[in-house]
Amino acid sequence: MRKNHYVRKFIILCCLVSLSSLTWALSPTVKNPQVDTPKRLLLIGNSYLYYGDSLHNVLRNLVIADQPEISKALQYKSATIGGASLDHHNIDWLTKPGQIGIKEPFELVILQGHSGAAINAKQGETHINAAKKAAALIAERGGKVALYMPHSYVAPHKQAAPENVQKNNDYYVKLGNELNALVIPVGLAFAEAYKRDPGLKLHKYYDGSHPSKEGTYLAAATVYAALYNRSPVGNTFDAFGEVDPKTRLFLQQVAWDTVKQFYGR
């Protein structure tokens, strides 16, 4: 009963938000991958990346299922700290060649900060400063950065509000444009998925913050479409049987539609 209560409350609060209803005051200037078929990839963030068997593992399996010919070349790493902001990470150490088992510099580093950065002035400023510093360091080492736009809170989270989807979009697009970085529209994919099917459970019901297994799958499919410019629709990876075929196809289609519209591809 409690799960259904939260779902109903969420529907009333924010299921009307969709890609088509956003004002798009800001649009990304980087619309295509800046690294061709990235193989050395580092994800830096917090529990949003860790939940659901770790986003980097789901992403890697999506890549392998679609492009088995590059599977042996993939070198994915993930550095997560629960509840962390980007400035909590020692990015200099993490990205130094050979330091965490990858001999060559990372081609691409995905930066994910505090989930409330777009709606909290102090956290927002902290993330901007940390992202700028990280981007400069990574560029010195020959790599590119991408910004992970997180999903918004839903009920029962006390900061859940429908306008947060737009705030996330504007905040991350503005920062991405300043850094000349690719912005990955995970938050928009969540909003679109809920618009199409309000009964989905993409968040953990008990906090309205962390992603469920299906949420992590949608996030990974969105990251895949954004980074590799390939459709995830029809991908056979099913999170080792934990995402049913109908839901898997639905999430793949939402991810692809969101990425195409966001970048205008």
Image (spheres, helix red, strand yellow):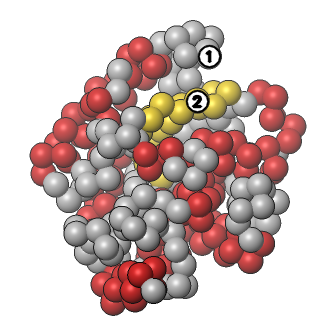
Name the residue type under label 1. Answer: Ile
Q: Is residue 16 visible?
A: no
> Quick one: label 1, few (<14), some, or many (20+) residues within 10 Å?
some
Give the secondary structure at mark 1. Answer: loop
Residue 78 pos. (x, y %): 53, 33
Nearest to the observer: residue 238 or residue 167: 238
Position of 182 relative to 21 (above/below): above
Name the residue type under label 2. Answer: Lys
Q: Residue at x 52, y 50 (%)?
A: 51
Q: Which mark identifies residue 75? A: none
How many marks overall?
2
Lateral position of residue 145 relative to residue 234, left or right:
left
Quadrant of res 165:
bottom left
Position of 40 relative to 103 (above/below): below
Nearest to the observer: residue 157 or residue 184: 157
Position of 43 relative to 90 (above/below): below
Residue 207 pos. (x, y %): 36, 65
Give the secondary structure at mark 2. Answer: strand
Q: Residue at x 52, y 74 (%)?
A: 201
Earlier along the polypeptide chain: callout 1 or callout 2? 2
> How far apart are labels 1 and 2 at the CA level?
9 Å
Nearest to the observer: residue 188 or residue 57: 57
Lateral position of residue 35 relative to residue 13, left or right:
right
Q: Which mark identifies residue 77? A: 2
Position of 184 relative to 215 (above/below): above
Residue 2 pos. (x, y %): 41, 81
Q: Which residue is mark 1?
A: 102
The reply to whether callout 1 and callout 2 are in contact (CB within 8 Å) is yes
Quadrant assignment for the N terminus: bottom left
Quadrant assignment for the C terminus: bottom right
Q: Residue at x 50, y 44 (%)?
A: 50
